[in-house]
Image (cartoon, grey):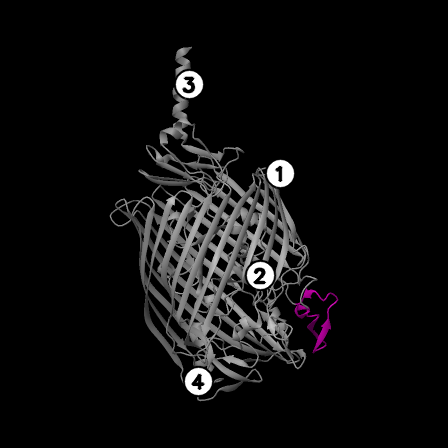
């Protein structure tokens, strides 16, 4: 009997050792924890738990120091033998506040945020499920730290620290999304991304040019999409999510499905989403100037003005969209990982609402002003090798090809000529990124990058009565833009409590543009343009951690933006009476930024986070009055228009503060607040100072959240924005009657506003989650600063998530 008992113990121990699959769960709820990272330096290994809280740790065998970490939980350090003694089960204790989390946006590699001198904010998938953003632009807005402008419902242009559009960088799975036609005005490209297919979103505030090159002046938005999950056992793993959602303010009908199938070495992840939005209803209480109760309609070959039955509907604002993602992962052994991703997004045609509000002599100016279908396609291959040698600990090669298509379609009221301008960009990129430990104190991040953009533009005009098509001026020249760069970034651990980061990047950029096709329409005194130049940027930052509950950061960094095809070659009407023409004589603009931040936890009840920043933009690319062959005005679109062009003609600066508070009022009730205040000014033609266009007024979010275990969450929150008076509006904004309300003097301004919102989420079990709420339940009529369309009025939102 004793012999049998000893054999059972022995073979049981052998069976447990061979399984080598660890299970990680919450100590209090006993529920599995997904996304837990396990890291060992000797042997060098890493793993992440799947949706069942499991991970294969066979590579960790013999390790004396395994770090087990998940944001919001106390980090554990265990020996491999200790995990075996625990039968490969680890329980983590939830931690009230956390100053340390794993981030990737600072260097493209996973690292601790406590070693990063720049401010980085992560938007977790848990917050996304509770807040139910309709688009990825709205996803950024729920952070409370990113201001989002909209010119139409199918849009969303982030503003970060007084910068927007082509002074911000977007990355998807580490691949640059910015193209050579990203403009200085507001951009809508972020809606190409599927919020349901995003695992994690990070926003890096301030310059990021050392790692990301041109455009990374105000910040970097890094989106990590779903990663195919491998099986930790010999059996294949199958999992997925199905989501359906409805909202009343725009009769939203949304459906999403993602599926993961994984074996030990192969895994596949598929995602599909579909959205359909009707015209957006704005609120009942607010400025009358935001109400437009008419819209154009083609009837019996004539444009007529239709009076709306419901004056609060914003017509036209309806649109639809589909997204598809397919990923394939192959991991033949612990040293190699291959991941291929295919992404596709397409919108319907949708109206630009602010342009439909323009009038001429009291009548509607446009019968049509629409964006054509916006399409984005990306193929990318990511290869990672993790065997340490003299040159690197790990290396990642990213190869990507992207195709962008967008178009603008407009027709004046009772004009038979419909003008269409279509743009196509083929973007190719190669990134080779290395990480290398040098001794015990230095961690080196370095790499090379090459980017090529091929821009094609076509302008046509169709007579809608007889179908005759003729050529009109193209929006852009036929052009190629390229960039070649090398960079190095050193993370230096001086002491346990102090670390430094020093970075340097050299970037060479070039552009070739051919304006020949537009010479028939404009008397340009040039037919071609070339750029061939370089930029050197750097950063120096420090992080001091006097104790585990306090972090002090300081960072100085430079950034640049090289002129792109939009800057040099665009032809467009910015506002009535003005037309922007090409200017081939441009240089890069440079930013110099300093920021300082402190984060501190007081006891287990209060966390405060403060960051102050100042950015100077030198040689700024701005729109200014211009001459063509000595003339100040030309006839454009039937109107005598002031000639303007993008020029290196100014200095600009932005400074401000970001403040965050998290307070546990009682054990289950928490208060969150994020506040943002910035002032931006730029040099005007006469040398005086005027407001910068993309410096948003004061804005923020406050949330009061009640959480009962993990099954029920109830949140009351408020979104708000301060007033932007007429004198504080940028000069270019003051004449935009279709966007702003009128003050007592009849001048345009952006009124202050707030919305009150109630959110709730109930988890029936590990598979079914019901969430919803009432947004703007006081039915305010509001319009975010610089936006051309009002936000939704009272809005009932319901979403059902089924996990399998």
Name the residue beneath numbered marker 4. 524
Give how far apart the Cα atoms at labels 1 and 2 are: 36 Å
Q: CA distance from mark 2 to mark 4?
A: 44 Å
Q: Quadrant of residue 712?
A: top right
Mark 3 to mark 1 CA distance (whole Å): 40 Å
Residue at the top extreme, as displayed: 1
Q: Nearer the viewer, mark 2 or mark 4?
A: 2
Crowd band around label 3 with a 10 angstrom C-alpha radius: few (<14), some (14–19), many (20+)? few
Residue shown at the point (59%, 80%) measured from the top left = 468
Q: Which residue is mark 1?
A: 764
The correct choice, above or below, for 269 with respect to 361 in the image is: above
Work out whether 319 lies above or below 260: below
Per the rendered image, the range of residues in magenta is 288-315
N-terminal of the pair, mark 1 or mark 2, is 2
Magenta stretch contains residue 313: yes
Q: Residue furthest bottom?
A: 630
As measured in the structure, the alpha-carbon distance from the residue carrying label 4 to the one carrying label 3 is 89 Å
Tell whether 584 sits left or right of 767.
left
Q: For this view, does 294 lie left or right of residue 472?
A: right
In the rendered image, is residue 472 in sight? no
Mark nearer the viewer, 3 or 1: 1
Quadrant location of the C terminus? top right
Give the camera-side residue of 305 and 502: 502
- Dot 1: within a 10 Å radius of its alpha carbon, few (fewer than 14), some, or many (20 or more) residues? few
Q: Where does label 3 land, which residue?
A: 8
- SS state under label 3: helix
Q: Secondary structure at mark 1?
A: loop
Of the two numbered discs 2 and 3 in the rendering, the one whose residue sits closer to the viewer = 2
Toward the viewer: 488 or 545?
A: 545
């Amino acid at each position: 009997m004793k012999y049998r008992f000893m054999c059972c113990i022995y073979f049981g121990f052998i069976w447990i050792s061979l399984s080598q699959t660890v299970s990680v769960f919450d100590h209090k709820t006993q529920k599995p924890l997904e996304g837990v990272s396990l890291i060992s330096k000797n042997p060098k290994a890493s793993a992440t738990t799947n949706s069942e809280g499991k991970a294969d740790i066979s590579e960790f065998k013999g390790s004396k120091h395994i770090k087990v970490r998940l944001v919001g939980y106390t980090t554990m350090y265990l020996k491999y033998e200790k995990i075996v003694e625990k039968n490969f089960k680890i329980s983590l204790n939830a931690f009230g506040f956390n100053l340390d989390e794993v981030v990737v946006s600072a260097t493209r590699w996973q690292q601790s945020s406590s070693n990063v001198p720049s401010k980085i904010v992560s938007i977790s998938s848990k917050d996304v499920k509770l807040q139910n953003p309709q688009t990825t632009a709205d996803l950024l807005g729920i952070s409370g730290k990113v201001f989002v402008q909209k010119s139409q419902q199918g849009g969303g242009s982030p503003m970060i620290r007084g910068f927007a559009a082509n002074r911000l960088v977007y990355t998807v799975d580490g691949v640059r999304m910015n193209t050579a036609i990203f403009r200085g005005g507001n951009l809508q490209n972020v809606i190409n991304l599927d919020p349901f297919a995003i695992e994690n979103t990070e926003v890096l505030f301030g310059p990021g040019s050392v790692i990301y090159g041109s455009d990374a002046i105000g910040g970097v938005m890094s989106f990590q999409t779903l990663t195919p999950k491998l099986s930790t056992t010999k059996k294949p793993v199958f999992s997925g999510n199905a989501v359906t959602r409805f909202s009343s303010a725009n009769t939203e009908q949304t459906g999403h499905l993602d599926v993961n199938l994984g074996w030990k070495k192969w895994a596949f992840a598929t995602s599909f989403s579909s959205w359909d939005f009707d015209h957006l209803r704005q609120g009942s209480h607010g400025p009358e100037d935001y109400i437009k109760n008419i819209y154009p309609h083609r009837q019996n070959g004539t444009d007529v003005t239709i009076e709306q039955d419901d004056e609060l509907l914003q017509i036209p604002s309806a649109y639809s969209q589909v997204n598809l993602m397919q990923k394939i992962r192959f991991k033949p052994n612990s040293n190699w990982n291959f991941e291929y991703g295919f992404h596709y997004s397409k919108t319907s045609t949708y109206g630009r609402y602010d342009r439909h509000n323009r009038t001429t002599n009291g009548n509607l100016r446009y019968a049509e002003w629409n964006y054509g279908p916006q399409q984005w396609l990306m193929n990318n291959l990511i290869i990672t090798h993790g065997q340490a040698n003299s040159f690197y600990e790990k290396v990642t090669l990213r190869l990507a090809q992207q195709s962008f298509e967008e178009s603008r379609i407009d027709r004046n009221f009772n004009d038979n000529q419909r003008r269409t301008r279509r743009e196509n960009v083929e973007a190719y990129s190669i990134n080779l990124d290395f990480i290398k430990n040098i001794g015990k104190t230095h961690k080196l991040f370095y790499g090379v990058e090459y980017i090529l953009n091929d821009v094609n533009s076509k302008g046509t005009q169709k007579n809608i009565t007889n179908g005759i098509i003729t050529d009109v001026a193209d929006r852009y020249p036929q052009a190629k833009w390229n960039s070649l760069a090398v960079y190095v970034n050193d993370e230096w651990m001086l002491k346990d409590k102090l670390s430094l980061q020093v970075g340097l990047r050299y970037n060479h950029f070039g552009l070739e543009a051919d304006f020949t096709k537009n010479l028939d329409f404009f008397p340009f005194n040039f037919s071609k343009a070339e750029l061939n130049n370089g930029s050197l940027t750097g950063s120096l930052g420090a992080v001091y951690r006097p104790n585990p509950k306090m972090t002090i950061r300081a960072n100085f960094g430079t950034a640049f933006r090289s002129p792109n095809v939009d800057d040099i070659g665009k032809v467009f009407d910015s506002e009535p009476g003005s037309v922007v023409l090409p200017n081939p004589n441009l240089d890069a603009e440079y930013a110099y930024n300093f920021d300082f931040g402190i984060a501190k936890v007081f006891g287990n009840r209060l966390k405060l986070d403060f960051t102050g920043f100042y950015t100077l933009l030198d040689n700024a690319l701005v729109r200014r009055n211009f001459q063509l062959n000595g003339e100040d005005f030309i006839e454009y679109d039937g109107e005598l228009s002031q000639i303007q062009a993008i020029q290196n003609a100014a200095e600009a600066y932005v400074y401000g503060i970001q403040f965050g508070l998290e307070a546990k009022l009682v054990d289950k009730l928490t208060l969150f607040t994020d506040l943002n205040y910035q002032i931006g000014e730029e040099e005007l033609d006469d040398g005086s100072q005027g407001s910068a266009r993309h410096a948003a007024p004061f804005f923020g979010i406050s949330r009061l959240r009640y959480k009962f275990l993990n099954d029920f969450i109830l949140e009351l929150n408020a979104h708000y924005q301060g007033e932007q008076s007429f004198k504080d509006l940028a000069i270019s904004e003051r004449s935009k009657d279709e966007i702003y309300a009128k003050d007592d003097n009849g001048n345009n301004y952006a009124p202050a506003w707030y919305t009150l919102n109630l959110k709730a989420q109930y988890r029936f079990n590990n598979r079914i989650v019901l969430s919803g709420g009432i947004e703007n339940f006081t039915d305010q009529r509001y319009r975010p600063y610089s936006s051309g369309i009002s936000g939704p009025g009272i809005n009932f939102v319901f979403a059902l998530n089924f996990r399998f």
